[in-house]
Structure formats: C-alpha cells, structure tokens
Image: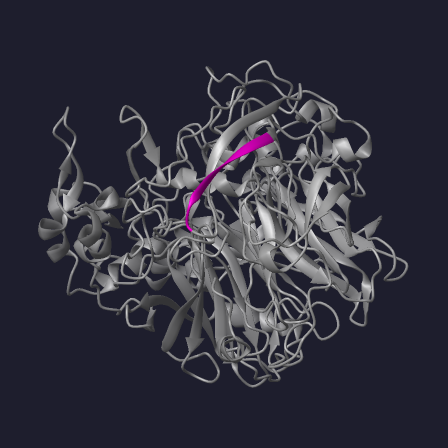
C-alpha cells in the first residue's frame, strides 16, 4: 500500500465514536470507546518489525529483526536495498525481540473433568469471556477446532494409498497415547475425527497482568464436538437407531448434549428431515472463525461442512427444493452417523459460562460456508451482523433483526437471531452497492458469466473456468430429470470430450429459464431458501466474490466494515466478479497485479447500518509490494482491531505452496515465474512446463501476522509482526488486555515432522524498484512445534493456542 497521509487515514478510518458496543468486547476501551485517530504527531513503532523474506517499504524506514534460531536473531539497519540474498526459516512462532510467545493449551491436553477427554485438533477462532466483567485476568476461552489433517493419522481426508508419506510417524498415538485403526471406514476412526472438530471451553487465568495465562481446572471446562448428542440417534426409527457411540471410552458413548435450531429452517425444513429428530441436532463441526457477543456468548461459524468422496469428514451440501438433503454421501461421516446435511453450515451460539445453555444453530443467518460474524449492537436499534461465505465465488452477507436491542449486555439478545432479514451484497463497479433481501418474493436475475469475466476476457481474450456460476438444478429445466443440487453455467457450453455429456451449460441457453422469476419458483419455503443460501444468492444476482473470510467493524465508525477477501482466483465453486476483483494475472509484466486477495471496506449509507445501500473501497491489495497494485502480503484471512485502532491481519497462504515447495515426503520446488499470464501459462524458461499464478505466494514464506498502524509516522504501512512454524497458519486473533491470544493451526501439515530435513531452493522475488532478484531459501521440511521449544526437538507437532505479550508490559499490547 502506498503510505497514507494522516488526512487520508482520518478519512479512511473515520474519527467518529458512538455508544455502539461491538464484538468482541475485550478489555478496557477496546471496542466502541477507542480514542480518536491522531491526525498529527504520533510516535514511532514501539517494537522492531519482523524481517520476512520479501522486501517491504517499512524496512527502508525502520530497523528490522531477522530470526536466526529459536529465540535468537539479529537487528538489521534500515536500508534502501531491502533484498535479502539468503533467508532461513525457523521452526517456531517468531515474534519481535520486545515480545514473548508461550503456549496456553494445545491439542491432546487433558484439561477437562473427564480425563479421558482431550483438547481438539486444528485450533481456529478464539473468544474470551471474563468471569467478572471488570477482571480480564480470569475467564473462559473458547477455541474452534476446524478439521483434521495429516500428520494426525494416515487415514485423513485427501490421503491416498500411494502417498509417499506412508510409513512416516503420525501424531495421534504419540499425543493421545493409543493407536487408531488404519481404516477410514472404521466407525471408531470416523468418530474420533468428528470428536477432534467442534470446539473447547477452557478456563484460563493469571494472577495479575504481569503473568502468563494458564489453564485452570474448572467443572465448566468441556468439549462441544462433531458428535455431541449422538445418543439421540436412539430416538430414530431408521438404521441409525443403533449408532449411538464410536468406541468403548466414556466420551465415545453417545450423550444427550445435542444442539437445537432456531428460525424458519428449524420449523419449515428440519421437521421434514429424514433423521426424524425434528429440531434436535447432533454436534457442531467444521468450525472456522466466529464472534463474541457483548452479552457473553460465542458465535461459532461452521465452514467447510461439505463432504465428497475424498473429503469424507463432512455431510451432504446439496439440497432439494424443500431444503432437505438430496442423499447421504457414501463413505462420509454424515453417512456413517446419520448426520443430515441441512443441519450443518450454520452460525452456532453457545455460552461458555453456562453449560445449561443448550447451543443453538441460528438458521435466520443462512446456511453456507461461514467464516465469521461481526456484530453491531446498539440499544434501541436492530441487531446487525455481517457474515462471509468462504468459497471462491462466495457472497458477502448482512443480517438485520426484526426486534431491537434493549441493552447490549442482555442475555435475551440471543432471541434477536431468531427473526430478521438476511441480505446479500451486490457490488457495482462505480464504488456503490446494495443489499438484496433473500426472501421468497425476491426476483431472480443471475449475473451472466460473460459479465462476471468481462475484465479478464478483455485483457486475455479468455476466462478462467469459463466465468462459471452455479444455479439450482430443477426437474424440467434444461432437460434435467432430477431435483436438487446445482448445475454449472459458463459463457459457452462445455461437454465431456469422451462421452459427449454436458458438463456446463452455456449462458445463452441456460439463463432464460432462471430469469424474471422469484425465489418461490425454485423453493417451497423461506426456510428452504435459507438452507440453500449460496445458490439462491446466485439466482437473485448477488456479487460472487473473492472468498470473503473475516469481517470486522471499525471501532471508530461502526458504519464501516472491513472485509478480508482472501483469494481472487476462480474455481469450480464460482468466479469472483472481475469488475470488482482481480481474478488472474492480466499481463506478462513482472509487476502486474497478483490475484492473491485484498482488503475491502464497505461504508453503510444508513446511520444505523440497517439500510440497503452502501459504498465500498479497496483498502489494501495482496501481492508483492512493487506489484501494481500490491502491498506486500498474500491471502489475508482473519482480522482484528487492537485497543489503539490499528488493524491486524493473518495470512492464509495454501499449505501446498509455502516457500515455493510442494507437500509430501519429498517436496519439489514449484516454478515461481513473475511472467506468468492468466491463471497459468507455459514457462518462459522452458515451454514444456506450465507455471501457475497461485505459486507466486511462495515468495512470502510462511504464513504471518501483520498490522497496519492507523496513526503515527508509520500509518498506512504493512508492518510484519510474527510468522508461524512451517506449513501452519495463524488464526483467531483476540486481544485480552496486554496479550494477543491466537491459534497456531496445522503445523507440519501434509509433510513429515521426523526425521528433520532442510529444503533449499532459489526463488525469484520482486524488489521494491520493480526488478527481480534471486534469493537462496532454506526451510525445514516439516515442523516439530511446540515440542521443539519444550525440549523434544524431534517431537510431534500440535496445533494449539498461544499468548503473545510484551516482555516489559505496560498494560497494553502496543
């Protein structure tokens, strides 16, 4: 990002404050009461920015910290030449020298009253609810557990029998202390995978703010997982009546801790579900990010719930016109335990401090691949929530409650999620936008693929994935003989070259059957519309976007919402609108924009955010700092504001391309070529090889955490703060007083953690002057974190939750 002037910072972030309470509300003067942006003056950074492998403008202005080993490093002076000829990645959470990091809780920890139970896998969102609202040194930590992946076992989704990882040690037996059968159809294996997702409630505390947080034993510490409430299967009349456990251990025997649904899908669809359980729901899973309400509850987002033959930990995503699933997917956990697909893919509310509060799935918020929720809660006004559907071509959403808030801290606010209007965003290229209600009587008018792809077609003469969009399949439309699920529509028809079968319909023949109607012509109830929200949004002409992940409300101006759009590249799910997002590399120029995500801001036109029009701006663009445009990061995911109003972002670069290496036992260097055109093209060095635009993320190294100051002399700069162990990502940042609580997810994913091995390669990188240079990069093949910092250098990697704080704390983080 070009450095903002202070006048621009004031205009962009706004200087207004109000009585609005925003979530999460964590600590003194955090959300809603932050001081105004300093328009003049300001002080330099109070820490040394972390040195990443790629050049950034901040390195020309500030000293930087180059890590050379675990808790070792050197200070580099600012220089006009920021190109590093050599860079070595360290297997640790590397933070500035003024800070320390420590593990609070990790996968496998026995922190529950039942000592057979353990903390779940692949930590994500963190939320903190203090026991006493005036004491932020003691409270309940909620942590999402999103999914399972190698190296937990060799039977995880995506692992094939011919994998070169077979024979390497895995971590389940080392951490949990027993073996799992090596059979992905085994009920115990599938059950244990489902137990490892969902979430955990754990009490954490410290004696005073000068100490570290640690787990406290508490009767309310508990798991809410993918099979919570499995015991209710005994109430069924089908074949699943006997499927009430997945093993002989106490926690593997089905309990009665089921969830419930609220809203119209619960009353109009769940009553039709084939499980016969009505409004009762077994478990929550696939939990990515979320939100923390001002009244002390957690809102956990169910994301990638969709199953397939290879991704078998999940349920059926496709539904019929009445909102019920089309079928079980053979071999999936949904099929094994009788989990009907329409009951997953929701926002789940739970109360960490109250085990008697039955967790509930709020169906008025829609069913899609939820990333998180950001709340605006103001007395006397409707509750407003912002949400994102994290898929390529996913949509940006807003919920406005029918009722109004009495007090932001009133527990009865939960009921406001039960009735309201769900809106979906339509972006216009002129910087305006509108919120379209997802109602039965909303007119249908899908955006044609040729319109979605118009910018890419104008630049390259072709469209990635044909500009594809997906619409609901209905019997009798386009000769279809079955109901439910979706069809694909592209600019022109595509057929299978072997069988001649149509794989996608051309827009000219397909779209007339979907235009000029209403959603009621495709769905039998409003509840069914909410269940099939993604396809319904495509039908009514909502903008398909670039994987909307985290959304956060500006603490200084609640009309402004920041949105992390993670990746502009299209896929089979959909095609982001190229009039709004950069979807591929449009020229062979080495400094051409890269489709590696961007950070947007929408500004509501209405004072209370309940209106139906807005404006939007691009705040920052993913890509190397000398790309046009580019700001020196890739694939921003989770966001958070600190107590000073600075915005923080975590990157989510794909594991399969970290540091320009593939995964597996013998990672191969990927071809990183800045002259690539489109999504992929022949290499300019050797036309026998294709290069992919997505592989440019290898430049950035490991996933990292950065922040953008909103005041002071460095305002507007991307400032690197930390990077994580190999093949991990940071997730779920939450500020609690002077501590950043954050998750470290999937260290050593899809690579061996032992024996240790160093990978080396040369990689081309853009310098700040727009020229290329070559860097020698050395990285560990896998990760042993956090075992390695606990004295076991060859030990198993464990996802978990850490705290980061200043060594000489003054009561705040920065």
Q: Give the residue at x 50% y 30%.
A: 762
Left or right placement of residue 562 versus residue 135 in this view: left
Q: How many marks?
A: 0
Residue 774: within the magenta? Answer: yes
Viewer-proximal residue among 728 and 586: 586
- Asked where in the image residue 293 lies, by quadrant, the reply is bottom right
Using the image, determine if residue 739 lies above or below residue 763.
Answer: below
Viewer-proximal residue among 238 and 167: 167
Q: Residue furthest left?
A: 509
Q: Which residues are magenta?
A: 770-778
Q: State which quarter of the image contains the C terminus.
A: bottom right
Q: Residue furthest right?
A: 207
**Place of residue 759 in the rendered image (x, y in percent of width and height, measured from the top left):** 57, 25
Q: Is residue 196 visible?
A: yes
Viewer-proximal residue among 195 and 323: 195
**Place of residue 587 in the rendered image (x, y in percent of width and height, measured from the top left):** 27, 47
Viewer-proximal residue among 596 and 487: 596
What is the image's colouring?
one colour
Using the image, determine if residue 88 lies above or below residue 703.
Answer: above
Dominant secondary-structure state across the stretch colored magenta: strand
């Amino acid at each position: 990002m070009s450095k903002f002037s202070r006048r621009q910072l004031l205009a962009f972030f706004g200087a207004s404050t109000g009585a609005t309470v925003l979530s999460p509300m964590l600590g003194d003067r955090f959300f809603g009461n932050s001081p105004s942006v300093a328009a003049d003056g300001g002080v330099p950074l109070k820490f040394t920015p972390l040195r990443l492998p790629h050049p950034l403008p901040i390195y020309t202005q500030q000293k930087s910290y180059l890590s050379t080993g675990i808790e070792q490093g050197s200070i580099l002076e600012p220089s006009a030449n920021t190109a590093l000829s050599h860079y070595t990645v360290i297997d640790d959470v590397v933070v500035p020298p003024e800070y320390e990091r420590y593990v609070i809780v990790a996968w496998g920890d026995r922190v529950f009253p039942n000592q057979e139970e353990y903390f779940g896998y692949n930590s994500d969102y963190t939320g903190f609810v203090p026991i006493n609202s005036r004491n932020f040194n003691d409270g309940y930590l909620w942590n999402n557990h999103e999914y399972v992946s190698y190296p937990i076992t060799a039977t995880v989704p995506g692992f094939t029998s011919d994998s070169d990882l077979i024979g390497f040690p895995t971590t389940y037996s080392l951490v949990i202390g027993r073996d799992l059968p090596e059979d992905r159809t085994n009920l115990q294996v599938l059950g244990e995978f489902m137990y490892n997702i969902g979430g955990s409630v754990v009490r954490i505390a410290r004696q005073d703010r000068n100490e570290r947080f640690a787990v406290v034993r508490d009767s309310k510490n508990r798991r809410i997982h993918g099979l919570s409430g499995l015991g209710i299967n005994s109430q069924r009349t089908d074949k699943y009546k006997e499927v009430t456990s997945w093993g002989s251990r106490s926690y593997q025997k089905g309990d009665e801790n089921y969830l419930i649904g609220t809203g119209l899908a619960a009353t109009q669809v769940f009553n039709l579900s084939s499980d016969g359980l009505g409004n009762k729901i077994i478990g929550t899973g696939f939990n990515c990010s979320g939100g923390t309400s001002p009244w002390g509850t957690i809102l956990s987002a169910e994301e990638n719930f969709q199953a397939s033959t290879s991704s078998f930990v999940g349920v059926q995503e496709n539904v019929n016109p009445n909102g019920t699933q089309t079928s079980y997917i053979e071999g999936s956990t949904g099929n094994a335990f009788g989990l009907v697909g329409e009951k997953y893919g929701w926002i789940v509310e739970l109360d960490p401090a109250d085990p008697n509060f039955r967790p509930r799935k709020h169906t008025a918020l829609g069913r899609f691949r939820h990333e998180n929720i950001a709340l605006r809660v103001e007395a006397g006004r409707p509750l407003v929530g912002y949400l994102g559907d994290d898929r390529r071509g996913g949509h940006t959403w807003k919920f406005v409650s029918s009722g109004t808030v009495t007090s932001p801290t009133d527990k009865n606010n939960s009921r406001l999620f039960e009735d309201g209007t769900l809106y979906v965003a339509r972006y216009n290229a002129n910087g305006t936008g509108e919120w379209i209600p997802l109602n039965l009587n909303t007119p249908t008018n899908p955006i044609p693929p040729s319109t979605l792809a118009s910018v890419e077609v104008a630049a390259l003469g072709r469209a990635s994935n044909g500009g594809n969009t997906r619409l609901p399949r209905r019997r009798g439309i386009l000769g279809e003989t079955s109901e439910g699920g979706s069809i694909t529509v592209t600019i022109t028809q595509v057929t299978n070259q072997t069988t001649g079968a149509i794989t996608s319909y051309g827009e000219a023949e397909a779209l007339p059957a979907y235009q000029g109607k209403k959603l009621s012509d495709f769905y039998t109830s409003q509840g069914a519309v909410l269940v099939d929200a993604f396809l319904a949004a495509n039908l009514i002409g909502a903008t398909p976007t670039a994987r909307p992940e985290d959304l956060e409300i500006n603490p200084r101006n609640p009309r402004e919402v920041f949105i992390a759009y993670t990746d502009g590249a299209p896929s089979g799910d959909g095609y982001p609108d190229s009039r709004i997002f950069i979807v591929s590399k449009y020229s062979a120029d080495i400094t051409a924009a890269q489709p590696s995500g961007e950070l947007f801001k929408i500004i509501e036109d209405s004072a209370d955010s309940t209106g139906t029009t807005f404006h939007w701006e691009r705040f920052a663009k993913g890509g190397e700092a000398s790309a046009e445009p580019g700001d020196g990061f890739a694939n921003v995911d989770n966001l958070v504001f600190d107590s000073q109003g600075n915005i923080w972002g975590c990157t989510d670069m794909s594991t399969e391309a970290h540091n320009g290496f593939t995964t597996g036992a013998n990672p191969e260097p990927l071809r990183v070529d800045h002259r690539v055109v489109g999504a992929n093209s022949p290499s300019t060095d050797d036309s026998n090889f294709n290069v992919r635009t997505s592989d440019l993320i290898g430049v950035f190294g490991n996933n990292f955490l950065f922040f953008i100051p909103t005041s002071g002399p460095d305002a507007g700069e991307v400032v690197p703060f930390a990077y994580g162990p190999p093949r991990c990502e940071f997730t779920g940042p939450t500020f609690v007083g002077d501590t950043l609580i954050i998750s470290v997810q999937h260290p050593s994913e899809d690579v061996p953690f032992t024996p240790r091995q160093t990978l080396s390669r040369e990689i081309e990188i853009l310098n700040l002057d727009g020229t290329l240079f070559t860097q020698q990069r050395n990285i560990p093949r896998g990760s042993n974190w956090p075992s390695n910092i606990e004295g076991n250098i060859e030990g198993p990697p464990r996802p978990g939750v850490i705290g980061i704080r200043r060594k000489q704390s003054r009561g705040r983080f920065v």
